[in-house]
Image (tube, helix red, strand yellow):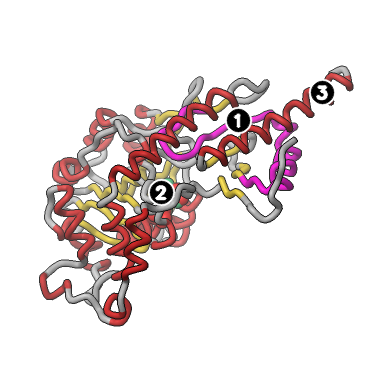
Amino acid sequence: MVTINKKAMIFLDRNENQYGPSPACFKVLQNSNEETLNIYSRDFTRGIKSLLSERLAHDFGTEEKKILLGYGSEDILKQAVQCYLNKGEKIMIPSYSWWYYKKIADDAEGISIQYPIVEGVDTFYYDIEGMIEVYNEQKPKLILISSPNNPTGNRLETEQLNFVLDKMKDSIVVLDEAYLLFDETYKTDPVGLVNRFPNLIIIRTFSKYYALAGIRTGFAFLGDNHDRISLLSTRYLGFNRLSEKIAIAALDSPEYYNSISMKMASDMEMLYNELNQWPGFTAYRSFANFILVKIPSEIKDPLKKYLTERNMIVKFMNEEGLDRHIRITIGTHPQNCMLLKLIRFFMCKEIKHELVQGV
Ligand SMILES: Cc1ncc(COP(=O)(O)O)c(C=O)c1O
């Protein structure tokens, strides 16, 4: 019997990090004083945007002016599109992508052109040739690439990324790496990349890996061609002083984040293995903190109802080509086990029903 606490909704639908931020982040809140709240930072007198951009520049070995800060990575994505894309100009976005890409392109009155992400056996992947073909045909002003991509979970490997960037030198490329850090073994060199490709902007966030979606803090590495967005986005009176301190506390807590991401990686494997065993289910390999799963279309509505009534919220997709799919955020271990248990109960009930009906 699955016991349910009516009040505790479990939200595994928005790719939030359910483990929460490191204890050091809460200490910042406890220790914050009046000055943090009522005084502007004076960082501009030192010629920098914020303690946080200074810290990131130091950690990544680059100049502070090459780091942009924003109100989440959403804000930087939107600023980049608003800054560079004029009405009627073309922007390339992946065929399966975060719905918001199309929305910000529409808001700028740009023309969005899709390039292919395709389904393989147990993973989606970027069709590199198809991507370059669309690029050469369309000659877009801007390209959005997401790696790992939401909702498919696949990423571009370093060689593929270099190859693609080499072919796209005539456009502005925005690389969204919101989910990059969940694979602790994957090493990248964002500063090396933006140094090599002046047209490139690489966007990251504190929302996902660092479990700080609420402080709305994102950052970007800028290639040399991006003075315009840098001027547009830099704020003379500084950044959110509380957010910058909390983000720095997160950067100071690598052991904590390493340990929770290892737990998530192990649970991702557990979900992948178990979900792939149900008839009609395909769980895809993912490098992010979520997993995409194709389910039989006839159980989509009943499963949604069953889970929702038990306070378990996962994302039931409706996009063209992904309308038999659910996207599950990897939660804490007990949350993941609870989800699997509910799906087990639901599927056993379904299979029993089919046997009785003689299907
Ligand atoms: C691919 C992708 N990029 C960016 C974001 C925005 O994250 P934030 O604005 O919290 O940094 C999201 C949010 O879910 C996302 O899925």
The residue at label 1 has a CB less than 8 Å from ligand 1: no
Q: Secondary structure at mark 2?
A: loop
Task: Give the extent of the magenta segment.
Answer: 284-313
Image quarter in which the C terminus is found: top right
For this orientation, the residue located farthest to the bottom is 38
Q: Position of residue 229 (x, y in %)?
A: 25, 62
Q: Which residue is mark 2?
A: 208
> Which is nearer the N-term, disc 2 or disc 3?
2
Whether residue 298 is in magenta: the answer is yes
Q: Which residue is mark 3?
A: 352
> Which is nearer the N-term, disc 2 or disc 1?
2
Q: Is residue 172 visible?
A: no
Q: Is residue 347 left or right of residue 242?
A: right
Of the two numbered discs 3 and 1 in the rendering, the one whose residue sits closer to the viewer: 3
Amino acid type, residue under disc 2 in the picture: Lys
Marks 3,1: beta carbons within 8 A: no
